[in-house]
């Protein structure tokens, strides 16, 4: 059994030795989040031919509609609110077959997000929601010409949120999707340039 393990490690070592890593890092953007008002840019740094670390910080800016339903439940007034905050997602990646940054990878990640929503016509009414969590993704990254990269990823995430309200914000109904407690799905796509 010891001989089989030794041979296995030798084959893996020769495979890794025969491939060469290109560059030391990639600057990335997540254009998928731009449609939801979440602007993330990040950096992946290669620690070895199979291992890398990445951090994706970002700003959150959007305008949402809130409503208040009258006592009859049939009519409601609509109000605009401004949402602003930040997100940061650090992760460690292990490339399963190819040399970083090419190929299939698995990546555990952490996540922190803080967003404050303020009613535009009632600046005293705010909601602040902070979420912390983590999970893992399975992704595939590929290199295009001239150092350009693209990647897709998907995986489960788990998070815990705390929410605080000021003034009369709880009277408003927010129908937009926002960070909530529990589990969910993290998915996306990034584009980048490596060197």
Image (tube, rainbow, N blue to C red):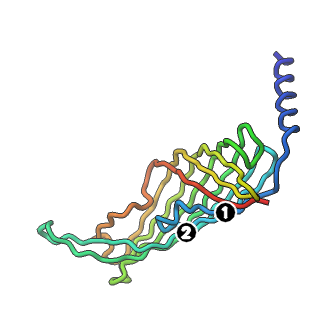
The residue depicted at 81 percent of the width and 56 percent of the height is 24
Is 62 in front, or is 142? Answer: 142
Say the numbered circle drawn on residue 9.
none
On the image, the x and y values in percent for residue 194 come to 75, 59
Task: Left or right? Give the position of 77 relative to 113.
Answer: left
On the image, the x and y values in percent for residue 174 come to 33, 66
Q: Residue furthest top?
A: 1
Task: Left or right? Give the position of 12 relative to 166.
Answer: right
Q: Are marks 1 and 2 in contact (CB under 8 Å)?
A: no
Above-or-below relation of 134 to 192: above
Is 99 in front, or is 114? Answer: 99
At numbered mark 2, what does the secondary structure look like: helix, strand or loop?
strand
Is 28 in front, or is 184? Answer: 28
Residue 147: name its quadrant.
Answer: bottom right
Q: Residues within 10 Å of mark 1 (few under 14, many from 20)?
A: some
Q: Which residue is mark 1?
A: 42
Task: Left or right? Give the position of 174 relative to 161.
Answer: left
On the image, the x and y values in percent for residue 104 come to 67, 41
The residue depicted at 72 percent of the width and 42 percent of the height is 95
Q: Residues within 10 Å of mark 2 (few under 14, many from 20)?
A: some
Above-or-below relation of 125 to 157: below
The residue depicted at 49 percent of the width and 48 percent of the height is 185
Residue 165: name its quadrant.
Answer: bottom left
Q: Which residue is mark 2?
A: 86
């Amino acid at each position: 059994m010891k001989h089989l393990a030794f041979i296995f490690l030798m084959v893996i070592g020769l495979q890794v030795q025969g491939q060469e890593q290109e560059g030391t890092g990639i600057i990335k953007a997540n254009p998928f989040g731009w449609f939801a008002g979440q602007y993330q840019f990040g950096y992946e740094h290669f620690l070895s031919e199979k291992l890398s670390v990445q951090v994706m910080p970002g700003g959150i800016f959007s305008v949402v509609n809130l409503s208040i339903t009258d006592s009859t439940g049939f009519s409601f007034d609509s109000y605009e609110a401004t949402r602003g905050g930040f997100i940061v997602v650090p992760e460690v990646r292990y490339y399963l077959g190819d040399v970083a940054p090419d190929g299939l990878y698995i990546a555990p990640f952490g996540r922190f997000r803080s967003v404050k929503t303020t009613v535009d016509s009632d600046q005293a009414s705010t909601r602040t929601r902070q979420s912390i969590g983590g999970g893992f993704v399975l992704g595939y990254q590929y290199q295009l010409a001239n150092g350009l990269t693209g990647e897709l990823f998907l995986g489960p995430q788990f998070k815990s949120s705390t929410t605080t309200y000021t003034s009369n914000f709880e009277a408003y109904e927010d129908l937009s999707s926002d960070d909530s407690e529990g589990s969910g799905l993290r998915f996306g796509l990034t584009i980048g340039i490596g060197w």
